[in-house]
Image (cartoon, rainbow, N blue to C red):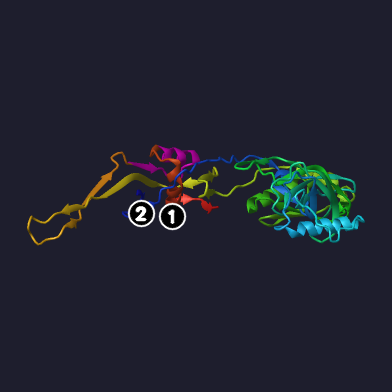
Amino acid sequence: MRRLITYFENRATRVTLVAAALVGLQLAIAVQAVASSRIKDIADFEGIRENQLIGYGLVVGLNGTGDSLNNTPFTQQSLQAMLERLGVNTRNIPLNTDTVAAVMVTANLPPFSTQGTRIDVSVSALGDASSLQGGTLLVTPLVGADGEVYAIAQGSVAIGGFSAQGDAASIVRGVPTAGRIANGGLVERELDFKLASLTRVRLALRNPDLTTARRVALSINELIGMPTAEPVDPATVQLELPRQYDGNIVDLLTDIEQLIVEPDLAARVIIDENSGIIVMGQDVKVSMVAVAQGNLTVTIAETPEVVQPLPFANGQTAIAPRTDLNVNTDPDAKLAIVPNTVTLKQLVDGLNALGIGPRDMISILQAIKASGALQAEIEVL
């Protein structure tokens, strides 16, 4: 059992936190240096974004690694429907589907894509195919959220893994049931979006923050020379386009993208308990607190003793319980005082001074937060 004791300044009480041992956890501390960034790196123009496309298709030409007939009957149905559209009569004819795999095809439609633009597509097995290696995706329509077809995908599938098997062994490396087709999609329908007709532009911050939104608005107003931009909420900055930029919006948006703004970051500690990763921003502060770490080991051993009756006595053999109890404490337990409003580096140095390993860092940070000494938000993934 590992005991963590936190002492508060001007208090006589102490808080004891018992944390279970965490095995195999690792610590990664990422210092987020607050640096100036371009607006294009911290915000997106509303309406100017990618759109997701999806489609259902067939991959053919597999070397016996396709879908099985019993487990994926929809593969056979899709194959029959496709052959019938091509004029091939497949009624009452058994089909072997181990060379065919049903797949889902996905792609991202970039903004302002025109007809004939090539896009990359991803292909993922839908049935029980063991590998898509060597397969070719047949013509597959890709639809958007509105159900309209925006692109057509076809081509040879390239995968990053492989699988092989014999009678008594098999091996799999990577994910052989998913792959990509570089430039395998062809845009057939353009999005109905006219940039030149806009009279108002909204910027969406990728990390919502009121201070950052205000700085973005001030930077835009300084560029234009009049108060045309204002923060609407922590995630949105609204810009009324001046008349002098009518018909020349592209130049204005280009200049806005290149403006330099210093984003404001909230003090936050991110903890992933599954992997043991801890990420702390540089604005994390800790008030005066004392942290002690020590080990308390309790060993209980049961050594039962067999008791025999005396000769010629009317007794019975019995078992007498015997318990050995031993308590050991760590003589090297350390107590460190973390000064008031320390920085991230000082916090880490203070914890390292206690000889604390990565496995205990999560519990210590949570205990400091519970004591009220950690001026940061803890987010557990």
Front residue (pair 242, 334): 334
Question: Looking at the image, is 341 positioned above or below residue 74?
Answer: above
Query: Label for residue 370?
Result: 1
Evaluate whether residue 300 shows in this view.
yes
Which residue is the extreme one toward the left?
312
Residue type at mark 1?
A: Ala
| Residue 168 locus on image (x, y percent) | 60, 42
| Residue 127 locus on image (x, y percent) | 71, 54
Total label count?
2
Residue type at mark 2?
A: Val
Left of 306 or right of it: where is 71?
Answer: right
Q: State yes or no: residue 379 in magenta.
A: no
> What segment carries the magenta color?
334-352
Left of 95 or right of it: where is 301?
Answer: left
Kindly state the secondary structure of the residue where label 1 is placed. helix
| Residue 263 locus on image (x, y percent) | 64, 46
Residue 134 placement: quadrant: top right
Which residue is the extreme one toward the right?
87
Question: Looking at the image, is 347 positioned above or below residue 243?
Answer: above
Q: Identify which residue is drawn at 11% across, 61% down.
A: 315
Left of 4 or right of it: where is 125?
Answer: right
Front residue (pair 1, 334): 1
Question: Is mark 1 in CB contact (under 8 Å) with mark 2?
Answer: yes
Kindly state the secondary structure of the residue where label 2 is placed. strand
Task: Say which residue label 2 marks.
Answer: 15
Dot placed on the residue nearer the N-terminal end, 1 or 2: 2
Q: CA distance from mark 1 to mark 2?
A: 9 Å
Q: Identify which residue is drawn at 64% across, 54% down.
A: 210
Q: State yes or no: residue 341 in magenta.
A: yes
| Residue 138 locus on image (x, y percent) | 84, 49
